[in-house]
Image (cartoon, rainbow, N blue to C red):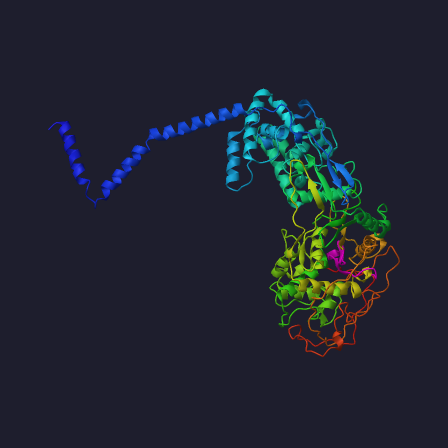
Amino acid sequence: MGRAEVRKAQQQRGARRAPSGHGEGKGSAGERSGIRRFFTWKTVLGTVFGGILLLMAALTVLYFSVDEPSDPNKLAIQQSNTYKWSDGTVMARVGETNRSIVPIDKIPEDVRTAFIAIENKSFYKDRGIDVMGLARGLFNTATGKGKAGGSTITQQYVKNYYLTQDQSATRKLRELVISLKVDQRLEKNDILAGYLNTNFYGRNAYGIQAAAQAYYGVDADKLTLEQGAYLAAVIQAPSQYDWATAGPNGKKLVMIRFNAVLDNMVEMGKLDEAKRKTVVFQEPVKPRPTPGMDGQKGYLVQAAEVELNRQDITDAEIAAGGWEITLTIDKKKQDALEKAVQEELESKLDRKDTKNRPQDQSVQAGATSVDPKTGAIVAMYGGTGLADKDRSNALREDYQPGSTFKPVVLASALEIGATTQGGKPITPNTLYDGTSKRPVVGSKIPFNPQNQDDKDFGKEITVQEATNYSVNSVYAQMIVDVKPVNVKKTALALGMRAREGWPEDKPAMSLGTMSANTVEMAAVYATLDNHGKKVTPTIIKTAAHKDREYKPAAPIGSQAVSRETADTVTKVLTGVVNEGSGSKVKSSAYEAAGKTGTTESNVAGWFTGYTPELVTVVAMFGEEPGTHKQVTLTGTAGGGRAGGSSFPAEIWKTYTLAALKGAKTGEFDLSEAEMGAPQAPSRTFSPSPTPSPSPTPTPSPSSSSPPASSPTPTKSATKSPDPTKSATKSPDPTKSATKSPDPTVKPPDPPLFPQNPER
C-alpha cells in the first residue's frame, strides 16, 4: 500500500471515531473550527493594521484641521479682579499683571533643569508630546487615581499661552496637535523660556522673574538650585504649597516634591550625588502685600478666594483676573469691628517692649460676624495687616475652640434624648457632680478633668449652672452619657468640619480639643440662633466672570437640629451672659447669649455670642513671632490670664453695641425651649465672688470664674424655678456613693488671675 493510500485510510478511521462521545465531539470541533476560521492570524493582523491606518488617517486630518493660534489667549494676558463692599462700592482692585518676561539665558541652568526634572524629564528628546506619559495619565484618570496628567512642558506652555485651563477632551486634542506644531517651529529653549514665563507660582506672581522676587526677593538670574527646586515644586498647588501659609500636610507634600526634583536631577545625570546630599531646603521670605490690599482688605480677599476654591475655581483662574466680586461685608460693621479690636486690644498692647511686655508680641486676634437670618458674613478681622501677618486669623484652623464647644455637647444630648448614667433625661435642670478631677463613669477611656482653678462646684449642680461657669467635670461626664460619636454628628450637622485627629471616641472632646476657626464656630452658633436651621456663612454676595460661572452654596439649609433643641441651648446660653462667665457683655441695649472658652495653657481665648440679629466670634491666639509656635497669652497687656471673658468679650461687646446702634433690636423667641423639671440639690450652690479686676489694661478674670457682680447661679437667667425652692428629690445614686459635703462650706475664692485655664 502506497503512502497516499495509508494516509487516506488513517483519515477515514479518524472520521469514523469522531461521532463517539454522545455527539458532543462533532459540535465542539465544528465550533472550534469555525472560530479558528474567523479569528485567523491574518484577520487579527488585518484588523490591527486597519485600526492603525484609520487612527493615522484621523490624526492626519486633525493635524491639518487644527491651526496654531497666532495670538495668545486672554488668560495669558493678566487682568484685574474687582472686589466690592456689600453696597456695591469698590473695595479693591487686585490682580494687575505681575509678570516680567526674561530670556532663557537669564535663568540659571540648574533652575531650568529643576523644572524639567519634576515636570518632563524627556523634554529635550520628545516631539512636544510624551506618548507614554499621556497613556499613563489617561490610565490614572480611568482608574480613579487622579486627573489625566502626562502633559509635557510644551503642552503646558501651549495650554497657558494659547488655550484655557478647562479639562475637556476637545481642548486636550487641540493641545496635542498645537504642541506638535509648536515643537516643530520653535527651539526647545524658546519653549522652555515661554513655559517658565507663563506659569503661575502663587503670591500673584506670573513668570519666573515675579516668582523669584515674591518668594526670595531676588531677580531670576540670582536664583540658587535650592530656590529653583522649591519654585519647581510649588507650581503644582501654589496656595497649598506656599511655605508661609501651608498647613502641616501642605508642607509635607511640597517637601516630597522638592526632594523629588533633586533626586530626578541626579537620575538624569544633571546633579552630582555628593552635591545632592548637601542641598537643603531654603525657606521663602515673608509675603509682601499687594498694593491696594492694606488693612483688612487683604484678609477679606483671602476669605473670598477660599470660598471660590470650594466651588472648584482654581487659584490660577482667580489670579488670571476678570472677576467682579461683591462681598457680603457691611462697611459700617467692618469699621466697627476694626475699631473695637483697636480700642479693646491693640491700644492696650506694647508690641515694641520685648523686655517688660514679652507676651504682647505674641498676641493675634481674629473675628467673624454673621447675620443668622441670611448667613452673610458682615464683618471679619484677620489681623494687623498682611505686612505683619500674611495668614488671616479669622480663617486659621490650628487652635482649639475650648469651652465654646460645650453647647454642642448639650445640643446633642437634647437632640437624641440622652440620659444620665442613672437614667434621668438630660435637661438644663438635670443635676450633675461638679467635683473637680472627678473620674467619668461609663467610659472605656479614663478621664478626670480639672475644673478652673481646681474648683469644686459641689456634688449636685444643674446643667444650667455648669454651663454658666463652664464646669469641666460636668461636661466630661455629659459627653460620656451622650456618647462622643453622637456629639461629633451634631457638631458636623451644626457647621463644624471633621479633620484628621478629631477625637471622636474620647471624653476630652467635651472641652473642645479639636481644631476650628472663627467661621465654623460662627456657623454653629448662627444655626442655634436661627432656631436650628443650618447656616453656612458666606462672604460672597455675587461673583461674575465672562468665561466662568459661580454657583454659591445655599447659606440657609434644612433643619440641623430641632427648634426645641436650638432654643433650649440658646436659653441656657442667655444664663451665661446674665449670670455666668459671660456677664461682661451684658447690656440693656440687646438680649444676648454666649459662651466663653479658654484653651489649655491659655494659648487661646474665645468669646462666641449672639443676639437675635447678629452672631459674632472673637478669638485671641498666642503665637510666637517667626516660629508660629503656640504660646500662652497669660501676661497680655501686663495682666494675668487672657481668657475668653477678658479681651474677646470686651471686643465683642464694643463691636455689637456699635454694629446694632440705631437698629431695632429684639428679644429671642424661645417659646419652644424646654428646660426640664426642676431638681433640688441637697445643698445650695453659692460660689464666692471674684475680686474686682485691676484697672485697664489688666484683663478680667478667666471666663469660668464667677464675676463679682453675678448673683448666685440659682437665679437662672432662663427664669426657671429656683431649684432650692422646689420639692426635694433624691440625688441621682449613680453620681456618687460618698457622703455629700457640708452644705455650709463654700468653695474657696478663685484668685484674680487663676493659673489653670478653663478648657
Residue 221, picture quadrant:
top right
Q: Which residues are magenta?
A: 587-613
Q: Look at the image and say whether residue 101 sits in the magenta stretch.
A: no
Q: Residue at x 48, y 27 (%)?
A: 58
Q: Is 39 above or below relative to 626?
A: above
Q: Residue at x 67, y 26 (%)?
A: 108
Q: Is 146 above or below relative to 564?
A: above
Q: Nearer the viewer, residue 749 or 396?
A: 396
Residue 166, picture quadrant:
top right
Expressed as whole percent of the image width and height from the top left, the position of residue 574 reads 76, 63
Q: Nearer the viewer, residue 571 or 4?
A: 571
Expressed as whole percent of the image width and height from the top left, the position of residue 197 reads 67, 28
Q: Is residue 121 left or right of residue 467?
A: left
Residue farthest to the left, as pictured: 1
Can residue 239 be seen by looking at this rendering? yes
Expressed as whole percent of the image width and height from the top left, the position of residue 308 reads 67, 43
Q: Nearer the viewer, residue 629 or 87?
A: 87
Q: Quadrant of the C terminus?
A: bottom right
- Counting every numbered tag in the picture gives 0
